[in-house]
Amino acid sequence: IEEEFDAIVIGAGMSGNAAAYTMASHGLKVLQLERGEYPGSKNVQGAIMYANMLEKIIPDFRDDAPLERHLVEQRLWVMDDTSHTGFHYRSDDFNEAKPNRYTIIRAQFDKWFSRKVREAGATVLCETTVTELVRDAKGKVIGVRTDRAGGAIYADVVVLAEGVSGLLGTRAGLREMPKPETVALAVKEMHFLPEEVIEQRFGLKGDEGCVIEAVGTISRGMAGLGFLYTNKESISLGIGCLVSDFATAMESPYALLDALKNHPSIRPLIAGSEVKEYAAHLIPEGGHKAIPQLFGDGWVVVGDAAQLNNAVHREGSNLAMTSGRIAAEAIVQVKSRNNPMTKRNLTLYKAMLDKSFVVKDLRKYKDIPALLHTNSSNFFTTYPQLISQAAQNFMRVDGTPKIEKEKATTAAFIKARSRWGLVSDAVRLAFAWR
Ligand code: FAD
């Protein structure tokens, strides 16, 4: 390719597709490069996809996007080794004409999104790894080099949508390598079951879906989360913990997933299933404090590569799509004024992103990652065990007077954490959450 482009997008995941689609549909000449055999072949997600953020890019996506189930029920579980205490929310209101959240399978979804990008006019090249950013004498990024034969490819601006493990930005010194305490390693399996079995087990009809998200002793004292998402004919089951915790605890992710599969609350839900896929991937979890420099002369960074991931609400794809769209809209605006893609002009991207839910949400929870990381054994083992014991004590009818049960529960909490510890945990959590 010897042409010059208005923009080169590196990566065809959620953020890259959102950016490429938005720029191409505004008439920019866009080249998108993806190292995978096809878009989605390298990508892993649970996965819940949030309709509102995709609607802002492709309003009629429901007409042909490969969607699995729309969510009518979400279960949040606190688990110990034999039980779970749950908060479940299910509503028929979610059976709306335009549902709000869907489960998706990324390999299919990313292919569909990429087709939309091509239809919007962008050139998409797969099996092409960008190996280097090209800069001019002043350091401005002016293009890329790839592993294909031929020289550099030039563009006014390069959008780095290379995901959390992308190395280009770090190699080029545009941002630091994510630290082990700011990324989680998640492993996931796809358990295949007949559609009617899934519907019966989760009380679903049609394309209704249910998800379970769980914390507790399943992460063996590490800061982590387990998840189970219903697709049409499969269940995605996985667990992820901070990389730094895996390193110190010397735990293996697969052993954790194995234990989760055999947990008495999970085992019946996947019984008889056939496992056809296994995947592992990183998730950025450092929150607001881990967001790197987002723009510079000739470049912007979006999605997971920019650590834009809300670990508290388990949202990533929507932040990726939104940051990709906003970066593209900023680039379109700079271009429409015939201004160069300098750091000064691309400040617009950050200004626009700051006003969006992406940065507002991450700022709100800015202290949560550090709090959970430094107190993981309390939040992920001690409290889940205490909650389970309290629930069982409350449910079990054995002739013990209720007043004694309440005293025993209070005593168990104080014994495990002390009065001061309980107050301090509550205050720190409340401050971090506000
Ligand atoms: P990616 O989707 O990772 O895409 C990056 C792309 O860049 C890849 O296609 C890669 O091949 C390509 N690439 C990288 N380097 C190069 C290069 N040098 N040259 C060319 N191409 C390159 N989010 C949710 O919203 N809901 C969920 O339920 C959810 N569950 C998750 C469960 C798991 C197990 C994991 C790992 C993540 C989950 N996420 C979830 C997060 C979500 O998957 C990410 O936030 C989202 O995929 C980020 O999109 P992205 O485009 O920034 O990065």
Image (tube, grey):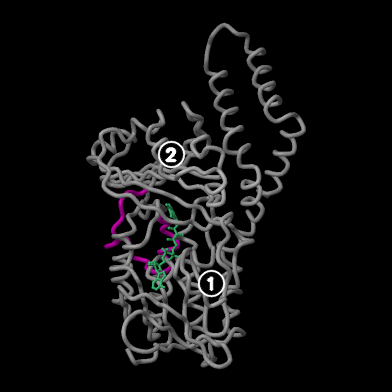
Q: Is 254 displayed left or right of 399 in the figure? A: left
Q: Which residues are magenta?
A: 49-70
Helix, strand or loop status at disc 2: strand
Which-is-in-front pick, marks 2 and 1? 1
Residue 40 drawn above or below residue 128: above
In the rendered view, would you say 311 is above or below 151? above
Coordinates of residue 234 in the picture (x, y in percent): 28, 45
Q: Which quadrant is the N terminus positioned in?
A: bottom left
Residue that extends furthest to the right in the rendered view of this protein: 420
Q: Separation of disc 2 and disc 1 at Cα?
A: 43 Å
Mark 2 neighbour class, 10 Å CA radius: few under 14, some 14 to 19, many 20 or more? few
Queried whether the magenta region covers residue 52, the answer comes back as yes
Q: On screen, 431 above or below 54?
A: above
Q: Is mark 1 within 8 Å of ligand 1?
A: no
Q: Quadrant of ligand 1?
A: bottom left
Up the image or down, 183 lies above or below 411; here it is below
Residue extending farthest top: 399
Q: Secondary structure at mark 1?
A: helix
Percent x, y of residue 179:
58, 60
Quadrant hosting residue 424:
top right
Q: Which residue is mark 2?
A: 90
Query: Identity of the amino acid at label 1?
Result: Thr
On the image, the x and y values in percent for residue 189 come to: 34, 46
- Image-based side of 394 in relation to 211, left or right: right
Q: Position of residue 120 (x, y in %)?
A: 32, 78
- Disc ID at residue 170: 1
Number of labelled discs? 2
> Of callouts 2 and 1, which one flags the residue occurring earlier in the amino acid sequence?
2
Q: Residue at x 55, y 87 (%)?
A: 140
Task: Please name the amino acid that badge 2 sits on.
Answer: Arg
Please tell me which residue is depicted at 28% across the width and 68% down the height of the picture: 37
Residue 209, numbered label: none
